[in-house]
């Protein structure tokens, strides 16, 4: 047990309620982290958009308009706030309750919380969940790096490097609740693809590789970009049958564990890729473009294959080599590298340095 039990206030992503899938992997990270920290005796209050659910833990739901997602906008897009913004309302709550907590932790990839850092009397730390996407956010992150060293956290080194101030970041990784994922030694013939259905995730490459390799693909995830989905349906008519919708964790792992491998085909620098460690936990190897987080997770030749980015034929060749990978080793990697306890301890150490700097 840690020496001090802390009172922590977590401010969730403002792009969607927790449980909706609109927030992507940070939703699972927030759930896992708050569970891991509570198990170590800390008091965690999660503030999130109204309608949020976080397993059986209570959430302070806040009303207001959702923020647009950063990855759907261009680099030069100005900072945008809808009227009655949920982000503003969440940070008003944080200001009103700051004297009751030891630390406020921001999980929003948005300008406002970074800007507000200096105006709070309680310390504010920021967990950054994506790589560099806009000039506005880069500037806000750099300001915190300069004014409040030690207050920035990221999933991976590669992700932190996209901001040009990698040394300012604490690298924290991710984790999963291993008990939620059942190991499956004998899969069926299909491959899996999991994620938000949005252009930066590159689903078309997975579809093309599966078609060339003549294997079926099971697709799970939030349908985020309707126009992109339409274009996929036109190009790959079979995609509608392969798409199984957005499933909660239990259903997700039931499908995933029966697959021979997970394909990850990001066009962007994937900050981490929670789906990679969910696959490993089920004993499912990961075939990924060597771009961002997956390149720091996959152990080539053992728990997956890394393929040169955007190389569809490379995916096809890796699919032909799946049987050289070891499903037991996948589960073992998830158990050793990505446990909830290890994640909670990394965050705990980081939080202590923020609460008691120097
Ligand atoms: N996910 C889910 N149900 C689905 C498909 C995906 O809950 O049917 C979740 C998955 O568990 C993961 C998240 O969606 O936590 C995707 O996160 P990832 O880190 O892979 O990518 P991001 O969306 O953050 O870019």
Image (cartoon, rainbow, N blue to C red):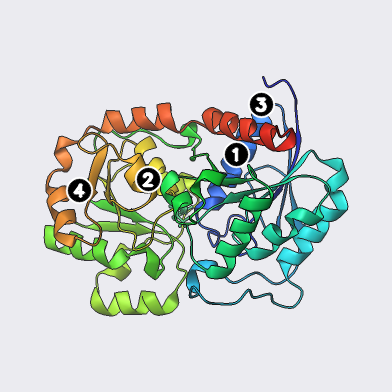
Residue at the spot of label 4 = 189
| Spatial separation of the CA atoms under disc 4 and disc 3 | 41 Å
Please determine whether, in this image, residue 17 is positioned above or below residue 290: below
Residue 40: which numbered mark, if any?
3
Q: How many numbered callouts?
A: 4
The residue at the point 69 percent across, 32 percent down is: 352
The residue wearing badge 1 is 33
Residue closer to the observer: 204 or 73: 73
User: Is label 3 in contact with label 1 (beta carbons under 8 Å)?
Assistant: no
Q: How far apart are the alpha carbons under marks 1 and 2?
A: 17 Å
Q: Disc 1 on helix, strand or loop?
A: helix
Relative to 352, is 251 above or below? below
Q: What percent of the width, then of the height, locates residue 309?
A: 25, 58
Q: Using the rendered view, name the quadrant where residue 201 is placed.
A: bottom left
Reading the image, the residue beneath label 2 is 276
**Sequence-earlier tag: 3 or 1:** 1
Ligand 1 neighbours mark 2 (CB distance < 8 Å)? yes
At label 2, counting other C-alpha atoms closer than 10 Å, the crowd grade (few under 14, some 14-19, many 20 or more) is: many
Cα separation, mark 4 vs mark 1, equals: 34 Å
Q: Please report the residue visible at 67 percent of the width from the left and 33 percent of the height from the top.
A: 353
């Amino acid at each position: 047990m840690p020496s001090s039990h802390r009172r922590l206030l977590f401010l969730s992503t403002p792009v969607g309620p927790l449980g909706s899938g609109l927030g992507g992997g940070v939703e699972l990270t927030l759930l896992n982290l708050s569970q891991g920290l509570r198990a170590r005796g800390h008091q965690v209050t999660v503030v999130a958009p109204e309608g949020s659910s976080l397993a059986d833990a209570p959430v302070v739901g806040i009303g207001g308009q959702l923020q647009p997602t950063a990855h759907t906008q261009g680099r030069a897009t100005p900072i945008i706030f809808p009227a009655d913004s949920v982000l503003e309302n969440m940070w008003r709550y944080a200001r009103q309750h700051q004297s009751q907590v030891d630390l406020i932790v921001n999980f929003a990839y948005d300008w406002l919380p970074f800007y507000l850092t200096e105006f709070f009397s309680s310390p504010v730390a920021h967990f950054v969940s994506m790589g560099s996407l806009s000039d506005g956010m880069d500037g806000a992150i750099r300001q915190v790096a300069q004014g409040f060293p030690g207050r920035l956290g990221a999933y991976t080194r590669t992700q932190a490097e996209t901001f040009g101030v990698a040394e300012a970041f604490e690298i924290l990784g991710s984790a999963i609740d291993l008990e939620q994922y059942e190991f499956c030694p004998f899969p069926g013939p299909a491959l899996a693809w999991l994620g938000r259905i949005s252009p930066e995730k590159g689903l078309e490459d997975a579809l093309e590789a599966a078609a060339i390799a003549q294997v079926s693909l099971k697709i799970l995830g939030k349908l985020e970009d309707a126009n992109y989905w339409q274009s996929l349906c036109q190009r790959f008519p079979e995609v509608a049958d392969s798409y199984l919708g957005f499933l909660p964790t239990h259903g997700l792992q039931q499908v995933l564990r029966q697959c021979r491998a997970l394909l990850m085909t990001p066009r962007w620098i994937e900050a981490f890729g929670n789906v990679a460690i969910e696959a490993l936990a089920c004993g499912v190897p990961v075939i990924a473009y060597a771009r961002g987080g997956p390149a720091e997770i996959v152990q080539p030749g053992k728990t997956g294959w890394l393929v040169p980015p955007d190389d569809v034929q490379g995916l096809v060749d890796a699919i032909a080599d799946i049987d050289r990978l070891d499903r037991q080793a996948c589960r073992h990697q998830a158990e050793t590298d990505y446990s909830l306890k290890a994640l909670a301890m990394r965050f705990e150490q980081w939080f202590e340095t923020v609460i008691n700097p120097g």
